[in-house]
Image: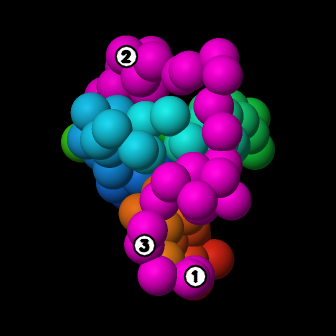
Amino acid sequence: MVELINRIRYYHFITGVLAHQQSDPLCSKCKAFVNTSERVKEGITELEGLHVEKFHILPGEFLGLLEETRDSLELINLPGDAVGQKKAGICRMPEGVCFIKLPKAILERV
């Protein structure tokens, strides 16, 4: 149950990052933004499929968090012509630093 709750919390967190970075002039047009958004949607779908039997015992606030996360993801607009901003030389963040990709390290630890 703890793992399920932590994953729900992670998806809520990363969706917030995506929602906010959607207004960033570089991140919003980056392939990493598109790929991460798609992986988050897939991850939530997989999570719901794997743990469907646990949802009836999940505290209500976490079910609400999951619903809020799904709703927020639906509002994210993905560009059809996304380009890897770093590879294109547009993003000047240091090597290995990406606002969109870095939060994935959290998921690997929960």
Please indicate whether residue 82 sits to the left or right of residue 5 in the image: right
- Residue 83, compared with residue 70, is above or below; it is below
Q: Earlier in the sequence, mark 1 or mark 2?
A: 2
**Residue 19 location (% of width, % of height):** 32, 36
Q: Amino acid at mark 1?
A: Gly
Nearer-the-camera pick, 16 or 98: 98
Mark 1 element type: loop
Which residue matches tag 1?
A: 96
**Residue 78 location (% of width, % of height):** 53, 22
Q: Amino acid at mark 2?
A: Leu
Which residue matches tag 3?
A: 93
Please indicate whether residue 16 sits to the left or right of residue 27 in the image: left
**Which stretch did the figure color magenta?**
67-96
Please give the label number shown on residue 57: none
Mark 2 element type: loop
Query: Nearer the viewer's eye, disc 3 or disc 2?
Result: 3
Q: Work out whether residue 72 can be spotted.
A: yes
Res 96 → quadrant: bottom right
**Residue 71 location (% of width, % of height):** 37, 19
In the image, residue 87 lies in the stretch drawn in magenta: yes
Query: Nearer the viewer's eye, disc 3 or disc 1?
Result: 3
